[in-house]
Image (cartoon, rainbow, N blue to C red):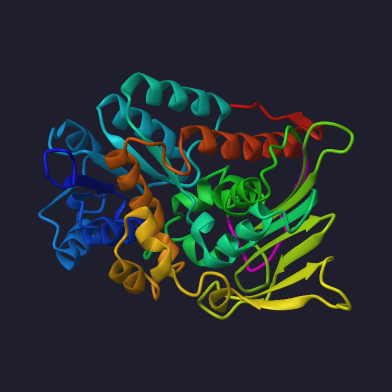
Amino acid sequence: MDRSGKRLRVAVVGARRGAVHVAAFQAHPASEVAVVCDVNRERAEAVAKRSGVESVSTHYEEVLERRDIDVIALATADADHAPQALLALDAGKHVLTEIPMAVELEQCEQLIKAVKRSGKHLQMAQQVRWAPYVLNAKALRDEGEFGEIFYAEGEYFHNVEGYLRGPNGERTWRSENPYAGILGGGPHPYDTLRWLTGVEYTEVHAYSVKPAVGGLERDADDHFTALFKAPGRGGAIAKVAVSSGLARPYCLYLSVYGTEGTWERSRHQEPGGQNSEDYLFLRKIPYVRTMMPVPSFRSRYHSFTGIIPDSGMPAEMGRAFGTQGHGAHDAMPAADLIGAILEERSPVIDVYEGARTCAGLRCALESCRTGETVTIPQY
């Protein structure tokens, strides 16, 4: 609740993916969803009815004009996020935006200026930072267990064939979006690696291809491989691969290599979920000659119920989300934004963090198009 004791009132725009954000804000004691907005009224009404939301809208402009709305959550098409976020900030609203925050470098700069101008918060909803296996690895990194990090890998493999056409066979925005490949899913591995390793990459060289897999029909290439480099001859390197047209089940793979230790996530993840066994090697442990398995949910953070209250989320809320979507961490960006507003601090993935991630991936896309190494702007 805000300083007056009132709950923060939220508008969720985009009812399909936005249903997750409706559930998150509705479950948090300091917020409530006042309106669900979607161009498809039937879809908006279904989500609102299921979640006990008082009203629906099919016009974003109507939502912006509502003076009772404190926060706008954007779960719309990728290319719409930045323009809609700019309008929301200038209307005096805090913003939670799905990935990517922006698809052009100019939009990153515009959003930074809008946050400064408005005094409002913007959080990019890249929920993987709160995944238990990432928190485990981050704790090890913060304790210096890996030594000097010199290499990292991230792969986001997700066949999106089922999302390219609507119920009547029409092409969806995902099939017509030229940014959908590396910018659509790339923030998951790239943003996570940036934060996990503490490395800022300043240049990138990337390649993309369009394999004929599964009859995909889209304007963007389906596979991207990018090499990111930190400054200096000895600067760390990261490889990020994003593939949306492949013959393979979902996989989010991450690994970190340092002078004193290595952490790798398994590429074998349970059907319908993103949990896996992690593997660890530490030089300081004698007589070990193989990677040691580290069960994600049975290690340092036994469950989300222990860490969710630190971000202002009740343990019951975490347990409720544990079986949905990406898991309990799907609700964490909303909880963190609420905490940032009430505690007058920056969100975990604020406009600067979002800009660093989106700029790196946009430069990777430019490298694919030009065949040249591209310098990444630093924010």
Splitting the image into 4 quarters, where does residue 325 fall? Answer: bottom left
Q: Is residue 102 visible?
A: yes
Residue drawn at 79 percent across, 57 percent down:
257
Residue 182 position within the rendered picture, expressed as x and y whole percent measured from the top left: 63, 48
Asked if residue 161 is positioned above or below residue 376 in the image, the reply reads below
Residue range of the region highlighted in magenta in the rendering: 204-217
In which quadrant of the rendered image does the C terminus lie?
top right
**Rendering coords of residue 161 (x, y %):** 55, 65
**Residue at 48%, 62% in the rendered image:** 163
Q: Is residue 209 visible?
A: no
Seen at 54% across and 34% down, the residue is 355
Where residue 252 appears, as percent x and y from the top left, is 62, 64
Look at the image and say whether residue 214 sits in the magenta stretch.
Answer: yes
Frontmost residue, 377 versus 138 = 138
Inspect the magenta stretch and tell me whether residue 221 lies in it.
no
Position of residue 166 measured from the top left corner of the image (x, y, whole percent): 40, 61
